[in-house]
């Protein structure tokens, strides 16, 4: 018998969850609750129950798993209510407004003995999996600098995402995903955070930011989100001691450029280039480098929920663990502190 799932919130993300869960055998979306009656009507029109209240959803014995897809400032309230009702919980990101909120949710889940996880679905993005695979295969040697960015030119939506008290802003929106991807990929603690948050169009929240993380193993990573950019930089640019990885965009076009195994010797004397006389920045001889295509990977966002189901049934460990989400929020807390004080925040996360 399929596990019944209830959706708290049936806006854009709630409907996205509903549509994607149709591909997950073993989970059945039973119904949804939303404070806006029109959205409840959409849920009913899609063939699931439209609960009249949150209490009605949580009292339904068919619902064993709850997905919280409400605005950020309601996450803690709804997660705690679902756990108190004996439901396993998936919460949209960011799971809390800060790290302390998540600690309270984790403690409640531990006391109740229930599965609790965060919807960090972008661990299954094709571009991200390509970067992981390339690094793991050693194609560019040991990485020392990672740049991860998303850029658009349409600004941020004029809804709760523009309101600080509601958890708006880009670092709590896209930043959560990009930071999580890097922390899951780099096996080393974050030791320094420096952030530059800008409020260009919306004075209450960050609509553009740059966040630099330094890890204990010496690697540095830049996370950048821009909402007013009209000519984009690469989605990923990773520097290793034997090559460079570039992923241009979500179409996953890109390349690996690396040094050949043949010995390369620097030319003696000055090299004259378009940049003027230089040896350091002169191009390498073409025979000393090679360009390779990006590796092919297969990935599926639905695997997130397949893992959640297996964790509830005791067959697998969670892939997205609350402790990992806590690291992300602690980095974000440090980013807000760094930007507001204009300092580099030292930590061990």
Image (tube, rainbow, N blue to C red):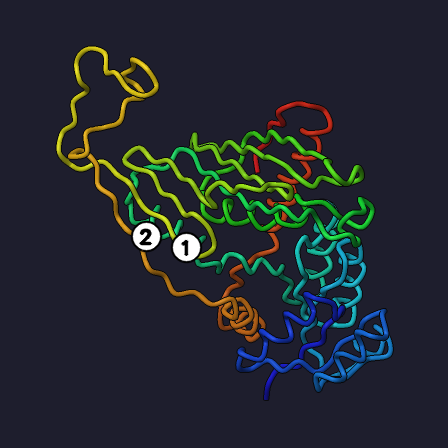
Residue at numbered disc 2? 294
Q: Residue at x 54, y 34 (%)?
A: 213
Work out whether residue 112 or residue 150 is closer to the camera in this orientation and state it. Answer: 150
Residue at numbered disc 1? 252
How many numbered circles does the render carry? 2
Q: Residue at x 32, y 21 (%)?
A: 274
Rendering coords of residue 332 (x, y %): 65, 40
- Asked whether the viewer can see residue 242, the reply is yes
SS class of the residue under badge 2?
Answer: loop
Rendering coords of residue 287 (x, y %): 15, 34
Work out whether residue 55 or residue 21 is closer to the camera in this orientation and state it. Answer: 21
Q: Are marks 1 and 2 in contact (CB under 8 Å)?
A: yes
Q: Residue furthest bottom?
A: 1
Q: Residue at x 29, y 15 (%)?
A: 278
Quick one: quadrant of the C terminus?
A: top right
Compared to residue 322, the image places residue 87 above or below, namely below
């Amino acid at each position: 018998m399929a596990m019944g799932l209830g959706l708290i919130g049936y806006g854009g993300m709630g409907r996205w969850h509903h549509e994607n869960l149709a591909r997950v055998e073993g989970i059945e979306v039973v119904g949804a609750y939303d404070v806006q009656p029109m959205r409840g009507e959409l849920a009913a029109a899609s063939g699931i129950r439209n609960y009249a209240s949150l209490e009605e959803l949580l009292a339904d014995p068919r619902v064993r798993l709850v997905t919280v897809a409400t605005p950020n400032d309601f996450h803690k309230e709804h997660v705690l209510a679902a756990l108190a009702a004996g439901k396993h919980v998936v919460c949209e990101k960011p799971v809390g407004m800060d790290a302390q909120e998540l600690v309270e949710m984790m403690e409640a889940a531990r006391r109740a003995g229930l599965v609790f996880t965060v919807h960090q679905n972008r661990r299954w993005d094709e571009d991200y999996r390509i970067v992981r695979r390339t690094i793991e295969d050693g194609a560019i040697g040991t990485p020392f600098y990672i740049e991860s960015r998303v850029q658009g030119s349409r600004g941020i939506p004029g809804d709760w995402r523009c309101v600080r008290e509601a958890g708006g802003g880009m670092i709590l929106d896209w930043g959560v995903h990009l930071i999580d991807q890097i922390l899951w990929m780099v096996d080393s603690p974050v030791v320094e955070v420096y952030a530059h948050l800008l409020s260009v169009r919306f004075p209450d929240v960050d609509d553009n930011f740059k966040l630099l993380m330094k890890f204990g193993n010496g690697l540095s990573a830049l996370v950048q989100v821009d909402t007013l950019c009209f000519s984009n930089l690469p989605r990923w640019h990773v520097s290793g001691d034997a090559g460079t990885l570039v992923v241009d965009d979500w179409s996953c076009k890109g390349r690996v450029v690396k040094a050949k195994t043949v010995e390369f010797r620097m030319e003696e004397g000055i090299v004259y280039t378009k940049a003027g006389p230089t040896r350091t920045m002169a191009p390498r001889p073409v025979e000393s480098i090679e360009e390779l295509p990006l590796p092919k990977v297969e990935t599926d966002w639905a695997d997130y929920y397949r893992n959640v189901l297996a964790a509830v049934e005791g067959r697998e460990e969670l892939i997205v663990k609350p402790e990992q989400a806590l690291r992300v929020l602690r980095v974000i807390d440090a980013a807000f502190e760094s930007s507001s004080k204009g300092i580099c925040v030292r930590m061990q996360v």
